[in-house]
Amino acid sequence: MIGTLRKEAGRSIVVGGGVSGLLAALRLAQKGQTVELYESRERLGGLIETRVLRHGLAEDAAHSLRASAAVRGLFAELGLDWVSAKPEARAKFLIRNGRLRKWPFGVFETLSALFHATLAPAGNRDAHLAEWAKRHLGGAAPAMRAMARGIYGSEPEELVARLAFPKIAPDPLWPLLPWVLRTKREKGIVAAAARKGMGDLIRALENKARTCGVAFHLGVPVPRDLVDPILRGSDTKSNLILTAPPDACARLVASADEDLGNRLEAVPYGALTCVTALIDAKAFAHPPVGTGALSMDRGDSRILGILYNSSSFAGRVLDEQVARSLTLMLRGAEPPTRAELCAILAASFDLPESALLEYAIAAHPRALPRYGLPLEAAWNHCRRFCAAHPGLVFFGNWTGEISLRGLIETARNFSTP
């Protein structure tokens, strides 16, 4: 979150109806503000949407989140029916050389990782993630490729380590292992999902916000006569919370600060395609067990990772004796053909073409922001502009809170005095 609210303002204009906009609107309304939310599309939720297929659920984007105390508190507040991951779903895998492995490194690589993690101090402050991993993880550096793909849908060369992973790649000149050991972490966090799909989280947030008095304007761009007076400082009785992607924010603020608009427009995004595949349960010689697998292989393959939906959470399929659910995370926004999907399933699980019962494709040309130097430059310009314009706040997955959990936890700041 970047910027500060005007404490004396009694009205807030929220631009963007994704999860960040819904969270901001709800918390501001609970604080006693008169809140109006504008979303240019006809529906809320941003990338998050759940579709119901013949054999189970298909998620367009987020499938689950880490349920910290703040997340569990929100679920309880919303009355949201949710499920935690199955006990047997704790196993996670990495794909190396096309094969699934729990620990894909040999003895030498493991010893190299321990040596580098214990002794190597931080190097270049602006090192990209691949360079940082090589310095701090030695032979196990390819594991960060899998993490970059799983969290950001990007390659490690496209991310700056200290921005993408601030908790394990700090600015101080500390070796990795001592820094990680001294960092406090919340205990009791579990993986969780809405029982009827993540779209239920969006509906629950909308319903709660409506009961708190939030006025929704769907399919309507925010009027300039609401935005411009706040940006010029002539309206001191209103707050403006921009939760839209940076390119949309750029179009709103460019008239007040052209340089800021250019910086926001330049924030790069990664393209991602999510394919939910419903598979004949009888076709598996050994049904996948665990959370899923992330790829650390280089090459031309589009596969970033595979999520084992029905292995992880109850309710992902109507009948686990009939179908199993997988999500293929693919690089780029070009929808795959059925033949391409069948080839991936055959290579990964030795499945025949007939095993694919049905599938749903969600292609996102601008899925997730890349946490690199262009984004940091936009942050710095946003901070300077907000310092001169109290009542303006930027809030979204590009302002430092990439995860749903981070957005939920940070949104509590809207309701503090």
Image (cartoon, helix red, strand yellow):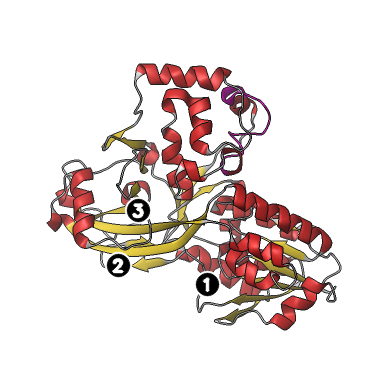
Q: Earlier in the sequence, mark 2 or mark 1?
A: 1
At label 2, the amino acid type is Leu
How far separated are the C-alphas under marks 3 and 1?
A: 25 Å
Q: Secondary structure at mark 2?
A: loop
Q: Amino acid at mark 1?
A: Leu
Tell me which label, 2 or 3, sits earlier in the chain: 2
Answer left or right for 228 relative to 124: right
Question: Which corner quadrant holds the N terminus?
Answer: bottom right
Q: Give coordinates of residue 49: x percent, y percent.
A: 44, 66
For label 3, the SS is strand
Q: Position of residue 222 (x, y in %)?
A: 65, 79
- The residue wearing badge 2 is 53
Residue beneath label 3, please?
330
Q: Is residue 363 above or below residue 286?
A: below
Part of the protein shown in magenta = 164-178
Q: Nearer the viewer, residue 188 or 39?
A: 39
Q: Nearer the viewer, residue 84 or 186?
A: 186
